[in-house]
Amino acid sequence: MFLRKNRVEEDLERIREANLPNQELIKINEKRSDDLGLEKGDLLAMVLAVMTLILPYVIAFLGTIGAVILLMYLFFS
């Protein structure tokens, strides 16, 4: 009788076990932790953000090269 846990402790232990996350779910979540979890429009938004950062510099570079080629054409022909 003294070695057996009382009923309250048994109930508390069952509650603790019920509140623990499932081990299979933990393994699945560990495998998926590398995923970014992107939503539907996130990839498009990232592409547009990168383009808005890079495109002005590309246009300026091409404009500068075009101006240099035009000046070389006018001076050397």
Image (cartoon, helix red, strand yellow):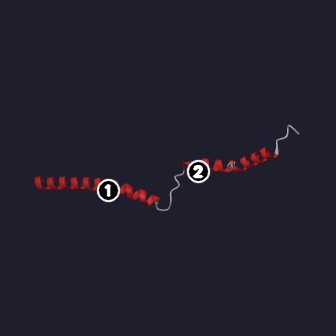
Residue at image mark 1? 55
Residue sitting at x 11%, y 53%: 75
Residue 63 percent coordinates (x, y): 23, 56
**SS category of the residue bearing label 1:** helix
- The first of marks 2 and 1 along the sequence is 2
Work out whether residue 48 or residue 75 is closer to the camera in this orientation and state it: 48
Q: Tell me the quarter of the image containing the C terminus.
A: bottom left
Residue sitting at x 21%, y 53%: 64
**SS category of the residue bearing label 2:** helix
Residue sitting at x 61%, y 47%: 30
User: Residue 74, can we see it?
Assistant: yes
Residue sitting at x 39%, y 59%: 48
Residue 17 percent coordinates (x, y): 73, 47
Residue 10 percent coordinates (x, y): 79, 45
Q: Residue furthest right?
A: 1
Residue 44 percent coordinates (x, y): 43, 60
Q: How many marks?
A: 2
Mark number for residue 32?
2
Work out whether residue 10 or residue 31 is closer to the camera in this orientation and state it: 10
Q: Residue furthest bottom?
A: 40
Work out whether residue 10 or residue 20 is closer to the camera in this orientation and state it: 10
Q: Is residue 31 left or right of residue 46?
A: right
**In the rendered structure, which amino acid carries the disc numbered 1?**
Leu
Q: Within 10 angstroms of label 2, few (less than 14), some, or many (20 or more) residues?
A: few
**In the rendered structure, which amino acid carries the disc numbered 2?**
Arg
Work out whether residue 14 or residue 8 is closer to the camera in this orientation and state it: 8
Q: Residue furthest top?
A: 3
Mark-to-mark CA distance, 2 and 1: 34 Å
Q: Is residue 46 left or right of residue 64?
A: right
**Front tag of 2 and 1:** 2
